[in-house]
């Protein structure tokens, strides 16, 4: 049984027939019989959704497509300005360190708890807001 992706097929005019095979030689006797009745019978290679004259032609087209230069640059992104949306949040190492030092020097605001939990009491497991699952009484 021929593979589903690429195979030899007999065409009558422009219409494919049910005669298909992986090897060209398997279809030659059938091709000769059909040529007795129909003048426009051909044997073609089907691959990648197209009908080719031979496997060599299909491989040459594939190689040419792979060797063709890419039409879009490396910074392409879908939609908009085609820039990386995460790039606007990137800051330098020096800027990060300056912001960190600024936070260390800032006095605590009223309502800030020493543990960082915005004034909520710690529940079970030492987490703000109660922690674990609720139990029904």
Image (tube, rainbow, N blue to C red):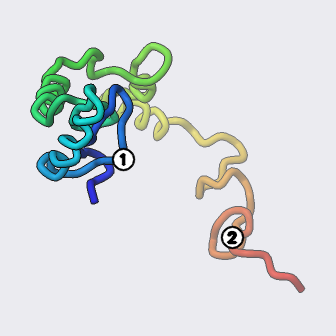
Relative to 136, is 17 above or below?
above
Q: Quick check: 52 above or below 136?
A: above
Q: Residues within 10 Å of mark 1 (few under 14, many from 20)?
A: few
Q: Looking at the rendered structure, which numbered label has been put on residue 18? A: 1
Look at 13% across and 28% down and name the residue there.
Answer: 57
Q: Name the residue: 28% across, 48% down.
A: 20
Q: Quadrant of residue 53?
A: top left
Considering the numbered disc 1 on the image, is that residue within a helix, a strand or a loop?
strand
Relative to 63, is 103 on the left or the right?
right
Q: How many labels does the image show?
A: 2
Rounded to the nearest whole Å, what is the CA distance between mark 1 and mark 2?
68 Å
| Residue with the most extreme right position | 137
Q: Are marks 1 and 2 in contact (CB under 8 Å)?
A: no
Q: Which residue is drawn at 73% across and 69% down?
A: 130
**Residue under circle 2?**
131
Q: Which residue appears at 34% of the width and 35% of the height?
A: 49
Q: In which quarter of the image is the C terminus?
A: bottom right
In the rendering, at what x and y percent does residue 83 appear?
40, 19
């Amino acid at each position: 049984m021929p593979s589903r992706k690429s195979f030899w097929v007999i065409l009558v005019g422009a219409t494919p027939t049910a005669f298909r095979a992986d090897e060209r030689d398997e279809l030659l006797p059938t091709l000769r019989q059909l040529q007795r009745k129909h003048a426009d019978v051909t044997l073609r290679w089907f691959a990648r959704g197209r009908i080719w004259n031979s496997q060599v032609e299909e491989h040459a087209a594939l190689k040419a497509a792979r060797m063709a230069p890419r039409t879009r640059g490396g910074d392409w992104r879908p939609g908009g300005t085609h820039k990386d949306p995460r790039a606007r949040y990137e800051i330098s190492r020096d800027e990060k360190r300056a912001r960190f030092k600024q936070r260390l020097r800032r006095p605590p605001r009223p309502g800030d708890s020493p543990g960082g939990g915005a004034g909520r009491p710690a529940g079970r497991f030492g987490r703000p807001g109660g922690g674990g699952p609720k139990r029904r009484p």
